[in-house]
Amino acid sequence: MHPATVLMITIAISVWLLSRLLSRGRRRPLGAADPSTLDFANLGFDYVQTRSLVRCDWSAESGWSSPRAQTDPTLSVHPMSSAFHYGQALFEGLKAFRTADGGAHIVNPTQNAARLARGCERLAIPPPPMELFIDAVKTAVEDNADYIPPYGSNGALYIRPFVFGHGAKLGLGAAPTYTFCVVVSPVGEYYASGAQKVPGCVIEDFDRAAPRGVGNVKAAGNYAADLMPAAEAAEAGYSIGLYLDAATRTFVEEFSTSNFIAITGDGSTYVTPSSDTILPSITNTMLQQLAADHGLRVERRPIPWDEVASFREVAACGTAVVLKSIQSLARGGEVADFGGRFETFRALYNRFRAIQVGDEPDVHNWCVPVAA
Ligand code: PLP
Ligand code: COI
């Protein structure tokens, strides 16, 4: 055969092999959704299996391993894991967005890393270091870049980091091994009501968190304890439940899913409870900054339930719910109704969304770019 023909065939085979290799690397794993068929504008908040999750494992001998992506969406753990029996588990929530220029960024991951580390200390879990947390979250987003909802869809890539104890252990004590994982899923609105306001009620018969308990960390067990009260509230027609302080039941704490925020009757002040038993919301911190930018006074203070009826606007805020306007709050026979007012929170929401999707400059340095 002519040497030029041999060269041509060799090149053709090499190109074919290379393209096979590259496409094999990106081939969609079994069970993963096809991003080209996802209806990104109407996602809701249901889990969608993406290409991969990212995991790091901890042992006493080796400490934390480097993040690695796996396409198997399941984890294999020992049935005597402390996460199952003693609730040694924490999770986080944050989001990544696609911007108009085709780029993508993650909002405020350092705050989630810091909050997870505080929770780890409380639950005797070795904390994933800040750099490891950021690296794992970035890897998860970058490896699943085609699942980030497009700019303009109103969706986001929800990022769910979590850490838990596992390994065989019977007696009460810290687990011998830990896994830190990051799962991602494209999402839209958390509450099915969309832009509609939601009716809420005070959870009367149960408390979310005890004084000096674990209400201020994102312990998995806090959420299990809320399932039954939240289901009862939903059955009674309330989309969202508000917890009061466990010690006196006179002060507002927070919603099952989110922090409580309000605008005072005269429209001058953004108020939110200060309490050692609520989760320090990262969204709330960012909204407080935007409220101050907007010329509002910002107050973090105990909020007596008796003051609530005087508020002009009430909302729930958090990563998943973003900023959800509350129509009314019922307690026993009373109903505090906030009418249709949402002007101030709408202005804050619009600015927050604009920063999230890169339409407004990130003047507070919340956004961390990803190569996606
Ligand atoms: N409060 C509770 C109980 C939550 O689960 C969440 C959600 O993470 C929040 C508040 C809001 O926190 P963040 O804004 O950091 O998502
Ligand atoms: C979040 O907002 O990220 C949360 O973790 C709340 C959860 C109830 C979905």
Image (cartoon, rainbow, N blue to C red):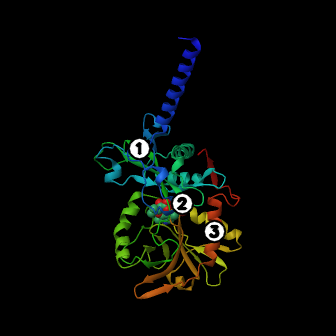
Q: Amino acid at mark 2?
A: Gly
Callout in the foreground (1, 3): 3
**CA–CA distance between discs 3 and 2?**
14 Å
Q: Amino acid at mark 1?
A: Tyr
Whether residue 46 is visible, yes or no, is yes
Which residue is label 2 attached to? 155
As displayed, is residue 19 above or below residue 217? above
Q: Residue 142 sits in which quadrant?
A: top right
Which of the pair 102/338 is nearer the observer? 102
Callout in the foreground (1, 2): 2
User: What's the residue at 61%, 51% (across, down)?
Assistant: 104
Lower sequence index among marks 1 and 3: 1
Is the C-beta of the residue carrying label 3 under 8 Å from the nearest atom of ligand 1? no
Residue 154 x, y percent position in the rendering? 56, 62
Which residue is label 3 attached to? 350
As displayed, is residue 164 above or below residue 252? above
Q: Amino acid at mark 3?
A: Asn
Which residue is label 1 attached to? 178
